[in-house]
Image (cartoon, rainbow, N blue to C red):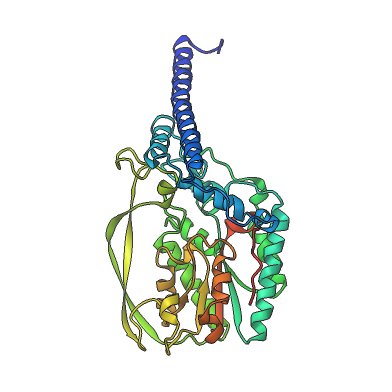
Amino acid sequence: MKNLPLDSKLNVEQIFSKNIISANIVGACFALLLITGVITTAVALSLDRLTLLPPALSWTAFIQGEISQKIVIALREAPVPKSLANTERGVSWVLAGDLGPRVRQGEANWLYLNDELVVNKNALANEDIRAKEIIKVRDVLANKGIKLLVLVVPDKSRIESSHLGRLQRSTAFSNRASRWINNLVGANIELIDFTGSLANLKASGVETFLRTDSHWTEQGAEAAAILTASKIKQLSISPTPLQITEITKLALMPRPGDLVRLAGVDWLPSSLQPLPESVQQSTFRVMSSANATSTVTADDLFGDADLPNIALIGTSFSRTSHFVPFLEHHLQAKIGNFAKDGGNFAGAAKAYFKSPSFINTPPKLVIWEIPERVLQSPVIDENIEL
């Protein structure tokens, strides 16, 4: 700092000193949390009030992560007050702007899921395994007279990269989605990449993803739904049963973001949380349909004589911002929504293809929605049986 003016030197030194103090306070809180956790967990184990391992141990369970998952779930029930963990997260955010390991802060109060920015080990092998799994599922479904349509949802950090600020996406991600998509298209998989549609919407000045949430906005979801409906018509699928819906746009309303909750700071007063956002939300009213009044779920489908001939499997993208109601609106038909929050690549597929709804009343078309961010993530028990 020898070439800086005296006042600049003092300013830099003050900022540096403040950051050290904040880091020390955060570190002390975290150390207190760890010490308290170790002591109380040890006491609980000694009193048989906490069980970390499952009754039956096996090498297969260990390899597939079942044992580690059991330990994580058990530790959540350890006698460390949840309020203590919340306090650590709140202090870290308020003093140091730290949102924890799962959430990263861009500029202008934009938040991003860290999973989108992490380079995974064996990334290319992982995406190749998933591509082969989709081809296998397509072939099995084709033998049953069922068509498959794959939807790929691009990363928020790619479409909304203008708000990343100091955050950076690895250059390894530059052609991740396009390479995977091209491989599947080369295998004659029917597929939609939402990148172009969302990018065009973004270029027109419309936000395609929520600022404090990992999911798309209603505008982004509807743009994806319109593209999907057009593709379904090209596949010569006649969606049934008929359902006409009326959409009403409501005034702007506060919408809690899942990234604020994931960061563990949603318990703070709103004035101390990352800047909340308000969004326009829609309501859907069924105008005409055959024996139906709302979007069909797994429980509604089984035993219903008027079943949709299109089933959707996927993730929370298919359960947020009214993607499925928008798709139903543009298809003028009901859809069986079997998507699962946290379903990642295969969660919803594994559950649906084993369900009575699929076995007893198979559809004409299966739509499989997959987020880009899961393409290269670690592969754990994703073999799908039909």
**Residue located at (54% from left, 64% from top):** 194
Q: Residue furthest left?
A: 251
Q: Nearer the viewer, residue 53 or 320?
A: 53
Is 76 located above or below residue 185 in the figure?
A: above
Question: Can you see residue 364?
Answer: no
- Horizontally, residue 191 falls left or right of residue 254, namely right
Residue 351: x and y in percent read: 55, 71
**Residue located at (59% from left, 75% from top):** 149
Residue 47: x and y in percent read: 47, 42
**Quarter occupied by the C terminus:** bottom right
- Horizontally, residue 281 falls left or right of residue 122, namely left
**Residue located at (64% from left, 62% from top):** 381
- Horizontally, residue 378 falls left or right of residue 333, namely right
Is 309 located above or below residue 153 in the figure?
A: below
Question: Can you see residue 206?
Answer: yes
Q: Nearer the viewer, residue 21 or 191?
A: 21
- Horizontally, residue 145 falls left or right of residue 24, namely right
Q: Which of the 4 image quarters holds residue 249?
A: bottom left
**Quarter occupied by the N terminus:** top right
**Residue located at (40% from left, 29% from top):** 95
Residue 282: x and y in percent read: 32, 66
Residue 53: x and y in percent read: 58, 50
